[in-house]
Image (spheres, rainbow, N blue to C red):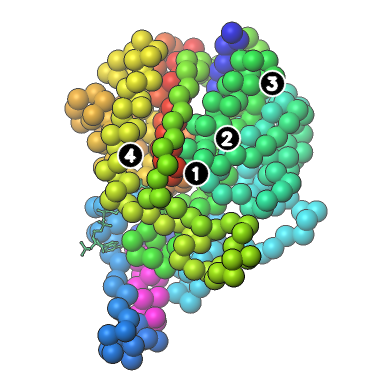
Amino acid sequence: MRGVVISGSGLYQPPQVITNAELVASFNAYADLQNAKNAARIAAGELTAIPHSSVEFIEKASGIRQRYVLDKTGVLDPTRMKPRFAPRPDDQLSLMAEIAVDAAKKALAAAGREGKDVDGVLCAAANMQRAYPAMACEIQAAVGAGGYGFDMNVACSSATFAIEQAANAVRSGSAHCVLVVNPEITSAHLEWRDRDCHFIFGDVCTAVIVEAEDRATSTDRWQVLGTKLVTQYSNNIRNNAGFLNRCEDTDPDARDKTFMQEGRKVFKEVVPMAAAHIEQHLHALGFEPTHVRRYWLHQANLGMNQLIVKRLVGQEVGDDIAPIILSEYANTASAGSIIAFHHHRSGLQAGDVGVICSFGAGYSVGSVVVRRL
Ligand code: COA
């Protein structure tokens, strides 16, 4: 079987930041406006007043301190509470493709590759901007890649699931060099008016180059030792937005048409699932969890990551073993574990083993075990 490496990564980070203080101020202004508008119904007991959010709660419950977004003004406007994006004509690069191309070019440069070297493009993200043509085809054209492109969505596990598809394509010889790109415009599917989740997500795009080991020229090569994917159906993270909505005559702005979750249940159910998954994967490859030099985990909740690694290695660990990026980026859906990999791999030595692992809606868990060459 042909060896496979990850030979470069790239990150697009939007220039606008929303701090927790700014976010909470705008949410509380929104709540006050709504409560004033509905004062009579609230007084009559027909409606419950919207309670205020708090920075202390957000930081204690999640570890998130800020997030990057593509449009801050729309999100923070208490009369709007969502980003504002100008529609683009069909002959212009679409927004999702634009951030994807930025991250892709950086990943290509890091791998010492050009667009023409790529013969497979996987656009893997929790949401796609349109039904078709595939985002991947637009990105493929914009970077000058050959071969084929397709979109895939496994929510927060989209990146690791796509890396497995890319690694399998390279192993089997159906592609030599695959661009995996994760444009996550999470601000567009987050319900900024819901106190329970308004702090969760941030926008970003990550990209990695997956290619044949015998062809790779990058000095920063990570051999893919194995990939392992699992899914188990759950409604605890759900978003009902879809192409049937207009035929169902439902409100396109109804609460179920954006991200919804039972956060506590997700926490309780996904921690043991992800820890067991990583342990089984490592054992199958002949490693113990304590042999792993670095865990680049999905970034949804600080406590979740700490508990998963504690289950694996038997003690609390710091950033050197399991780096945290969600305090700065928040949850960036499928991009989180790749941001961690992008920012926190330079200190590792040849032979060091690391695990990229995502977990999220589905439920879905995907792990990629890599060794530095
Ligand atoms: N500000 C102040 N208080 C808030 C609040 C806010 N923004 N949001 C919720 N609260 C309140 C709740 O109403 C609740 O009050 P009550 O006890 O009086 O009912 C209390 O704080 C606790 O809420 P809860 O939802 O149980 O908090 P939590 O400790 O479970 O933390 C999450 C919430 C979402 C941060 C946490 O559950 C989580 O991150 N889970 C994992 C989610 C995940 O990984 N999802 C994957 C997505 S891809």
User: Which of the two discs, 2 and 1, labels the residue nearer the N terminus?
Assistant: 1
Q: Badge 2 is on which residue?
A: 207
User: Which of the two discs, 4 and 3, labels the residue nearer the N terminus?
Assistant: 3
What is the span of residues highlighted in magenta in the rendered image?
Answer: 21-34
As for residue 106 lying within the magenta part, the answer is: no
Q: Is mark 4 within 8 Å of ligand 1?
A: yes
**Picture quarter with the N terminus:** top right
* Tag nearer the camera, 4 or 3: 4
Specify whether residue 343 is in view: no
User: Which of the two discs, 2 and 3, labels the residue nearer the N terminus?
Assistant: 3
**Figure quadrant of residue 302:** top left
Q: Badge 4 is on which residue?
A: 270
* Tag nearer the camera, 4 or 2: 4
Q: CA distance from mark 4 to mark 1?
A: 14 Å
Specify whether residue 27 is in view: yes
SS of the residue under disc 4: helix
- Three-letter residue code for mark 1: Ala
Q: Is mark 1 within 8 Å of ligand 1?
A: yes
Residue in view at x 58 percent, y 27 percent: 165
**Labels in figure, total:** 4
Residue in view at x 63 percent, y 21 percent: 169
- Three-letter residue code for mark 3: Ala
Check disc 3: other Cα within 10 Å, few if <14, some if 14-19, many if 20+. many
SS of the residue under disc 3: loop
| The residue positioned farthest toward the front in the image shown | 248
Q: Badge 3 is on which residue?
A: 175
